[in-house]
Image (spheres, rainbow, N blue to C red):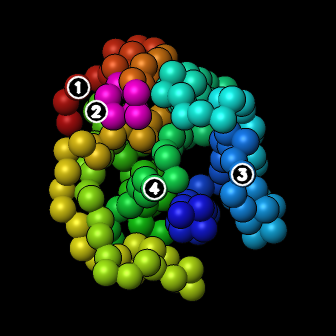
Amino acid sequence: MIRHSLNHYSQFCDTINVLDNQSTDDTLAIIKAEYPHVNVISFNSEGTFNDNIHAFIKNTCWKRSKADWVIVADMDELLYYHTNNTNGLRARLSEVLHHNTIYNFLPIVTGYNMFSETFPGYDQQITDQVKHGVPNENFNKQIIFSPQHIKETNFGPGAHACNIKFIDEPILGN
């Protein structure tokens, strides 16, 4: 999935950081050879999957960001906005920033369980190949937000739930 994720996010993200827990597969070699613009940040989970370490990282990795938007996603989570515009998600996020509502800090995310009969190839975007999905509220993860307005994300295990704390209370309305 690393190639699909990095191909997807490279379309519209200015900076991509991959957090690596000392993986033993070819992930780091793939990133180094094919995605030299991607930063790798290693951490030690002592060879185990530890939800507490992952939640801590997801709750803190974005804190110094000066970006308009931060996406905190696992490799199998692709943020997508359907449009005919080739710069669809980037354009939509730029537009959202100009609204005076909570959505200019925290866009709504609807999750889908996507499926395909074959594993998509790397010659084109995964979103151009996989066209079937079923809405699944377990995947409605708040993986995108404006870091300039968020004090804490408070992600729980798997980042399926969060308790956003704003720096200032957002203005609700139009």
Q: Is residue 113 left or right of residue 88?
A: left
Tell me: 170 left or right of 51: left
How far is mark 4 from mark 1, CA to CA? 32 Å
- Mark pair 3, 2: CA separation: 44 Å
**Front residue (pair 158, 129):** 158
User: Given this view, does label 3 or label 2 mark the residue nearer the observer?
Assistant: 3
Element carrying mark 1 = loop
Three-letter code for the amino acid on which mark 4 is drawn: Asp
**What's the residue at 59%, 61% (across, down)?**
2
The residue beneath circle 4 is 76
Q: Bin the neighbour count of mark 3 within 10 Å (Cα to Cα): few under 14, some 14-19, many 20 and up.
A: few
In the image, residue 10 sits, relative to residue 42, either above or below, namely below
Counting residues from the start of the chain, the first of labels 4 and 1 encountered is 4
Instruction: Say above or below: 110 vs 82.
Output: above
The picture places residue 91, in percent across and down from the top left corner, at 44, 60
> Which residues make up the magenta segment?
157-162
What residue is rendered at 23% in x and 25% in y? 172
What label does residue 101 carry, if any?
Answer: 2
Residue 138, numbered label? none
Disc 4 to disc 1: CB gap under 8 Å: no
Say which amino acid is labelled 3. Answer: Thr
Cβ atoms at labels 1 and 2 below 8 Å apart: yes
Above or below, comparing residue 152 to residue 88 in the picture? above
Residue type beneath disc 1: Leu
Q: Nearer the viewer, mark 4 or mark 3?
A: 3
Q: Quadrant of residue 153?
A: top left
Q: Residue 172's mark?
A: 1
Secondary element type, mark 3: loop
